[in-house]
Image (tube, helix red, strand yellow):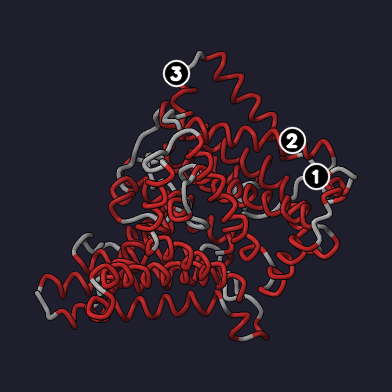
Amino acid sequence: MSFVSLSFLLFLAVALICYFVTPRRFRWCVLLLSSYVFYWFVGGLFAVSSITFTILTVYASGVWAGLLRRKQAKRALRRAPLALCLTVNFGLLAFFKFSESLLPSLGTLLIPGISFYTFQAAGYLTDVYTGKAPPERNPLRAALFLSFFPQLVQGPISRHGDIFSDLFAGHGWDWERSRSGVQRIIWGYFMKMIIANYAAPVVNTVFEGFRSHGGFIIIFAVLLYSIQIYADFAGGINIALGIANIVGVKPPENFRQPFFASSLSDFWRRWHITLGTWLRDYLFYPLTLSAPMGKLGRLLRKVFGNRAGKILPACLATFCVYFVVGVWHGSSLNLIAFGAANGVIISSSLFLEPLVEKLREKTGLRGSMSGFGRVFSALRTFAILGFLRYFARAESLRGALSMLRQTFFHPRLRELWNGALLELGLDGKGFIVLGAGTFILLARDFITERGTDCGQLLNRSRPVLQFVVLFVALMSIMLFGVYSDEALSANFIYAGY
């Protein structure tokens, strides 16, 4: 039951009606039951059993960790429930994600959203261990926190302090909250069905048969893939956040105009924000502040000086974080190379920052982040991302390298105007729809980047204009998204993570 299916819309309508007609003190029970019903239809009994196992182990470990903390037990003893639970659940995550590599006879044992709820569970348990979050005594309340259905399959990854109190507040129906939530849901469907689904045929055709296409067609497909994955992932997140907002829950934002990033590190601060902050707080900081890293820093200070002793451990921790990002995407060598390349580029930028600052001083670009400087930085970052997307989307490392070779040595510029584009799975009308949708997406992000909230801007406009905008958006989805043969009816890309 995907977000874009009619069955989900019927399920959502029933769930919301039941939520608002139920007495306030029991509304969280409706959310819990709805979450389990939803996950049953998404993943079946096996998926429900898996998340229930995670919930029970995290609940028991949290209670255990809280008890040891109150008794002021020794640190090694207090760490035991954390280490045991994380080892078991991350071990299961690794097994299910890499089952095809570990046991080829089993194939891939896909559990929808397992990465997202495992990371959320690990963050909660770590916060209990450090005293940042209280241990939940009610296993059903813990179950709702980890299985809240809008964010279950592809995030965002929430912290205990983000949504826990809202889940059990029993919010009543509110017009402004519902209006904003519905607007966000419509925008999410627009991104998914008008942009991502239209880009999918072209991207799939070129990446699966890249040897039949020239370099410029491949570059075009890589650019489309960058747009597709953004519209697909952010579209699903917008639907999830819109649904959550209707019931008074406010999960954290997961995207912030990533195509306007000024550097690769800035891009990752704007892209999948909740995963980035999770990795920063639970992997980067612990690595950087660990005893082995402290010893390494002192050794490097003696050999190479103070700056090297300070910056190189941070570079190493940064590389480890992005290497984990690559492994999180999958076990194939191209995805590991994708994460490692991000780590190398960002770590190198940290180390070379003083040299870059000197160059900026000499060229007069220091501190200039407007006009030409900002446009140049955004285009440079997008070009770097385009290079990295070869590895992220290709079927294998050899395939990614072959595509790069095809790009540089067989450009075939004439394919951009000789009709080859119309043989990629999308006709002229489809390209017009995709182009218009992409323009609207980038325009909206540009306005937001300039400091204007588009949702609030729409709400402050005249009712007639609000009606026209929403009517046109809905009709576009209905005419070009739902009933179009050109758009692929594909699941969300990150639903498999």
Q: Is residue 412 left or right of residue 251?
A: right
Q: Are marks 2 and 1 in contact (CB under 8 Å)?
A: yes
The residue where tag 1 is placed is 486
Which amino acid type is marked by label 2?
Val
- Which residue occupies 48% across, 57% down? 152
Judged from the image, the secondary structure of the residue bearing numbered disc 3 is helix
Which amino acid type is marked by label 3?
Arg
The residue where tag 2 is placed is 433
Asked whether 338 or 374 is in front, the reply is 374
Q: Earlier in the sequence, mark 2 or mark 3?
A: 2
Q: In this view, does 44 lie to the left or right of 489?
A: left
- Which residue occupies 42% across, 59% down? 275
For residue 439, which quarter of the picture?
top right
State the residue lying farthest toward the front: 362
Residue 444 visible, this orientation: yes
Q: Quadrant of the N terminus?
A: bottom right
Judged from the image, the secondary structure of the residue bearing numbered disc 1 is loop
Q: Earlier in the sequence, mark 2 or mark 1?
A: 2
Judged from the image, the secondary structure of the residue bearing numbered disc 2 is helix
Which amino acid type is marked by label 1?
Glu
Q: In which quarter of the image is the C terminus?
A: bottom right
Q: Mark 2 and mark 1: span between their CA atoms?
A: 10 Å
Asked whether 335 or 480 is in front, the reply is 335
Residue 460, label in figure: 3
Q: Is residue 208 above or below residue 81?
A: above
Q: Mark 1 and mark 3: span between their CA atoms?
A: 36 Å
Q: Which of marks 1 and 3 is nearer the N terminus?
A: 3
Of circles 2 and 1, the one toward us is 2
Residue 239 visible, this orientation: no
